[in-house]
Image (tube, helix red, strand yellow):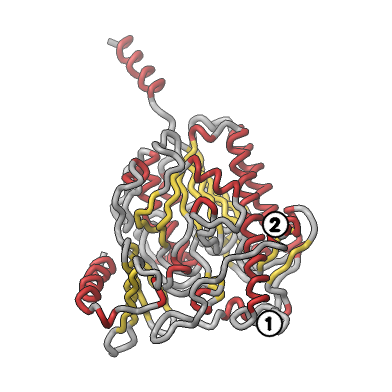
């Protein structure tokens, strides 16, 4: 009997499949203007390569068009507040209660035996700390979540400096004195993302060579800062765009009626040498080219990390997710920035690759949301999915790109609360102000006019039906 029991125990150990590693790549302010998403003028060969071996989600929408709130939903799997310090508010709530809050995404995987590491801008603050310069390691944005939190700062001195820095350690003080874009000769490390990528390579080597690497899988999240403002990148990344002809900006006119349009304050507060892209086409083109250069710079850093994963022979047991925290307007609706509920702010890239994926490289157009990532990772890692999550696993779309998704819920806080529901055909936006009757925007994406012609007044029954769906989701 003892021999049989021993044999069965050994057989179980041999047959037990090790849990997969997870590499989460977060890229700030990345529009879905990638070749693998159907746009040709920005060069992103490394992200395109990932898409060719993974599943691109062409209709992925974030919950909020701002960094902190969007990352809250990624890292908690739940709908949440719309402000940038949402995770810090959650941390204070956790400290004030005797009952533990539901775990974060990395916190849950940590409780299941994963080695969890964050590097760069994963939560809202690069490094995940608070304090005046975001460098106080006693103030955690996500307590109980990470085994290690890394943020190389180099000459930028601290995470806040790196977040809003330009070349060679230039730190934003008075934003009106900092150029809105820049192209400076030098290696990749003259901007913070070069240092973040270098640290990612070093960390992957440590993880691969760790004595318990075969027993303890890793959850490694790497956050790149570019193409976040200001648009600075090494000069070599601007070369492909100097003489490039860019496509016209679609629907560049300011919308009429009640919308989430704004005056592009985040962009306009930088030094623009007296120019305004809303009425200066040449300057608008210059801004778009510098944004493109930043995207290609981020693409290169992404490629370096993926190359190291292959070099260390980790790819065969690693789930890779590339996620953009929200979109960004480059002149559409006369907006230069994020923070709206239009398509340009809410749609962002999502690519998932894992060993055994069927039909790699085949994209899905099913509508999905950022909150779906947490349950998806649970399924792919063979872990039980926590019951408190608001999202749905994307395993159906990973198995079959034609599998149906569900409408995406997003929200923002401008002068008054606004929410939107986006399905495969329509976008409904509802604005609520005090005791006043709600106002609506309704757009038909089968129409070339898309989000430039509000058809809400013409289709009141459709508005009511979509509003019922919206309210049902908000009550979840």
Q: Residue at x 38, y 64 (%)?
A: 97
Query: Disc 1 and disc 2: Cα gap in Å?
Result: 24 Å
The residue singled out by tag 2 in the image is: 240
Task: Label 2: state its secondary structure.
Answer: helix
Q: Is residue 324 above or below residue 410?
A: above
Task: Label 1: state its secondary structure.
Answer: loop
Pick whichever, 458 or 64, lies toward us.
458
Please identify the residue farthest to the bottom as the structure is shown: 436
Q: Position of residue 346 (x, y in %)?
A: 44, 66
Quadrant of image for the N terminus: top left
Q: Position of residue 20 (x, y in %)?
A: 45, 36
Which of disc 2 and disc 1 is earlier in sequence? 2
| Location of residue 246 by image quarter | bottom right
Image check: 228 left or right of 416?
right
**Residue 14 at least partly seen:** yes
Quadrant of image for the C terminus: bottom left
Crowding at mark 2 (Cα within 10 Å: few <14, some 14-19, many 20+): some
> What is the tally of numbered marks visible in this picture?
2
Q: Name the mark on residue 275.
A: 1
**Of tags 1 and 2, which is closer to the observer?**
2
Q: Residue at x 31, y 64 (%)?
A: 425
Q: Residue at x 49, y 77 (%)?
A: 333
Please identify the residue farthest to the right as the structure is shown: 185
């Amino acid at each position: 009997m003892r021999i049989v029991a021993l044999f069965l125990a050994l057989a179980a150990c041999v047959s037990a499949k090790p849990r997969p590693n997870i590499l989460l790549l977060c890229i700030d302010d990345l529009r879905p203007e990638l070749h693998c998403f159907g746009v040709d003028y920005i060069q992103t060969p490394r992200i395109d390569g990932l898409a060719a071996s993974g599943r691109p989600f062409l209709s992925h929408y974030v919950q909020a068009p701002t960094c902190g709130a969007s990352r809250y939903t990624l890292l908690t799997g739940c709908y949440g507040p719309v402000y940038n310090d949402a995770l810090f508010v959650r941390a204070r709530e956790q400290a004030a209660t005797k009952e533990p809050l539901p775990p974060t995404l990395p916190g849950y995987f940590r409780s299941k035996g994963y080695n969890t590491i964050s590097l760069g801008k994963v939560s809202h603050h690069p490094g995940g700390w608070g304090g005046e310069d975001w460098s106080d390691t006693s103030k955690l944005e996500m307590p109980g979540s990470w085994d290690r939190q890394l943020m190389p700062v180099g000459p930028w001195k601290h995470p806040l400096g790196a977040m809003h820095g330009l070349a060679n350690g230039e730190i934003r003080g008075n934003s009106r004195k900092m150029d809105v874009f820049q192209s400076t000769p030098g290696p990749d490390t003259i901007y913070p993302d070069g240092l973040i990528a270098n640290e990612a390579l070093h960390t992957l080597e440590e993880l691969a060579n760790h004595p318990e690497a075969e027993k303890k899988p890793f959850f490694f999240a790497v956050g790149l800062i570019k193409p976040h403002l200001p648009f600075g990148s090494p000069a070599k990344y601007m070369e492909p765009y100097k003489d490039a002809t860019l496509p016209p900006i679609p629907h560049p006119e300011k919308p009429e009626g009640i919308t989430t349009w704004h005056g592009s304050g985040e962009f306009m507060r930088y030094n623009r040498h007296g120019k305004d892209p809303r009425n200066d086409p040449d300057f608008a083109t210059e801004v778009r080219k510098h944004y493109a250069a930043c995207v290609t710079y981020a693409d290169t850093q992404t490629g370096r990390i993926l190359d190291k994963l292959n070099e260390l022979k980790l790819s065969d047991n690693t789930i890779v997710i590339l996620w953009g925290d929200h979109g960004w307007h480059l002149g559409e609706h006369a907006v230069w920035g994020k923070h709206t509920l239009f398509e340009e702010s809410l749609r962002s890239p999502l690519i998932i690759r894992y060993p055994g994926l069927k039909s790699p490289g085949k994209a899905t157009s099913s509508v999905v949301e950022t909150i779906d990532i947490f349950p998806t990772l649970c399924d792919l890692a063979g872990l039980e999915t926590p019951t408190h999550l608001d999202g749905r696993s994307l395993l159906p779309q990973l198995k079959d790109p034609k599998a149906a998704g569900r409408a995406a819920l997003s929200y923002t806080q401008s002068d008054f609360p606004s929410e939107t529901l986006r399905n495969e055909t329509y976008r409904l936006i509802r604005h609520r102000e005090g005791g006043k009757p709600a106002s609506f925007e309704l757009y038909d994406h089968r129409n070339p006019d898309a989000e430039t012609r509000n058809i809400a007044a013409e289709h009141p029954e459709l508005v009511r039906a979509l509003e019922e769906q919206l309210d049902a989701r908000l009550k979840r």
